[in-house]
């Protein structure tokens, strides 16, 4: 017998694939049209309104959990792939592996450092320097960092 976790994961994947299709959207839109057209038949009474409100609330509530599960899995897979690319590239800063686990202030500090590097690179390009020249200069600057962190 499958574990509950495995069953939930399979359900989340299926729901994500199914709800992301144009046919599913058209079915949902058709449901709304049918509901709206039946309004005059039921005199726009409270029960008529309650049917759509209850149905959409239940679907929305359940979809939040299914979508979040799928998003968590996708994000984890992307992070692992990015970590592997960083690890495998010569000259890459291994200190950047697993950044998602850092505190917000540490992430902000690193983001600022990379924004400064990008601004310097744009300035150099505007001055007519080639991207290769810029990389060589930045590489020489980073070679002095014994901890493998960007300077």
Image (cartoon, rainbow, N blue to C red):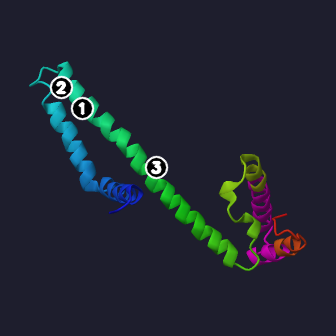
Is disc 2 placed on a helix, strand or loop? helix
Residue extent of the magenta highlight: 111-137
Res 149 → quadrant: bottom right
Res 136 → quadrant: bottom right
| Identity of the residue drawn at 19% across and 40% down | 31
Up-down relation of residue 50 to residue 66 (above or below): above
Cα gap from disc 3 to disc 2, whole angstroms: 31 Å
Q: In the picture, which quadrant includes the C terminus?
A: bottom right
Q: Which residue is mark 3?
A: 68
| Identity of the residue drawn at 79% across and 57% down | 113
Q: Nearer the viewer, residue 36 or 144?
A: 144
| Identity of the residue drawn at 42% across and 46% down | 65
Is disc 1 placed on a helix, strand or loop? helix
Residue 96 placement, left or right of 60:
right
Rendered image: mark on residue 52: 1
Magenta-drawn stretch, dominant element (helix, strand or loop) = helix
* Residue 111, horizontal then vertical, whole percent: 74, 54
Q: Earlier in the sequence, mark 1 or mark 3?
A: 1
Up-down relation of residue 46 to residue 111 (above or below): above
Residue 50 placement, left or right of 11:
left
- As for residue 80 lying within the magenta part, the answer is no
Rendered image: mark on residue 48: 2
Dot 2, how many residues are within 10 Å of its Cα: few (below 14), some (14-19), or many (20+)?
some
* Residue 114, horizontal then vertical, whole percent: 76, 59
């Amino acid at each position: 017998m499958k574990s509950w976790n495995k069953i939930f994961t399979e359900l989340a994947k299926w729901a994500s694939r199914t709800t992301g299709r144009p046919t599913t959207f058209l079915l949902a839109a058709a449901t709304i049209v049918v509901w709206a057209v039946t309004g005059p038949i039921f005199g726009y009474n409270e029960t008529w309104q309650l049917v759509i409100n209850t149905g959409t609330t239940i679907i929305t509530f359940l979809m939040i959990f299914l979508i979040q599960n799928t998003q968590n899995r996708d994000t984890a897979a992307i992070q692992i792939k990015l970590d592997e690319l960083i690890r495998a590239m010569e000259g890459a800063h291994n200190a950047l592996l697993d950044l998602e686990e850092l505190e917000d202030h540490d992430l902000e500090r690193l983001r600022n450092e990379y924004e400064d590097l990008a601004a310097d690179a744009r300035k150099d390009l505007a001055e007519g320097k080639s991207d290769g020249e810029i990389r060589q200069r930045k590489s020489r600057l980073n070679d002095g960092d014994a901890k493998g962190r960007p300077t």
